[in-house]
Image (cartoon, rainbow, N blue to C red):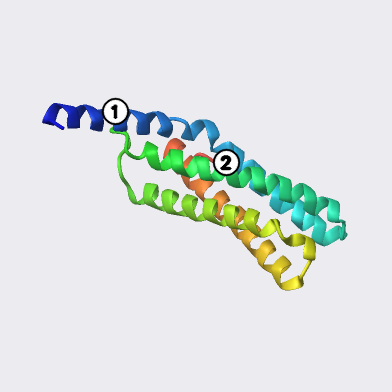
Amino acid sequence: MGGAAVTIAAAMRTTKMLLIGKLHPLVLHFPIGLVLAAATAELLAILTGRESWRAIGIANLRAGAAMAGLTAVAGWALTSAPFIEPSPLLEWHRWIGVAGATAAIGGAALSVRLGAQSKPRLFVYRATLLGAAALIGIAGHLGGTLVWGVDFLHL
């Protein structure tokens, strides 16, 4: 491959990454809402003893985990854009978001075998789900701070 072909290939990769990255603002609200809904449903399952809440939580977690993975990939791609300035806050947002997506995917994987209802497995599932919800909530807050500034929650 000649120098011009390599440059064109690199530009095409950059354009594709930027296109994927621009999906980040579009998809980021899904995992926040779905994983937080899953955690809320699991808490209701604990409080009421009704398995139907767990089923609702698992459905939300599985959808939220898929969207969290997509959101993390899109966010990572977005940071390669020339208009994104690196900062410590961006790095915290990035890595906490990746950790939250990973925890959500792990929780979704754990949910597949919850039918046996072993208490240790249920405990690990709950801890993973609640951890994912906390991490995704923190990453969302940091993302809001990046976009809207530190005072974005003040009225």
- The C terminus, quarter of image: top right
Write down the residue under mark 1: 12
**Disc 2 versus disc 1: distance between alpha carbons?**
25 Å
Q: Tell me the residue at 44%/36% (across/down).
A: 147
Write down the residue under mark 2: 67
Where residue 126 sits in the image (x, y, percent)?
69, 62
Residue placed most toward the observer, 48 or 110 = 110
Q: Tell me the residue at 62%/61% (across/down).
A: 128
User: SS class of the residue under badge 2?
Assistant: helix
The quarter holding residue 49 reads: bottom right
Question: In the picture shown, does residue 22 fall above or below 128?
Answer: above
User: SS class of the residue under badge 1?
Assistant: helix
Q: Tell me the residue at 76%/71% (across/down).
A: 119
* Outermost residue toward the left in this view: 3
Report crowding for label 1: few under 14, some 14 to 19, many 20 or more residues within 10 A (C-alpha). Answer: few
Question: In the picture shown, does residue 125 fall above or below 145?
Answer: below
- Residue mark closest to the camera, 2 vs 1: 1
Give, as a three-letter code, the residue at label 2. Answer: Met
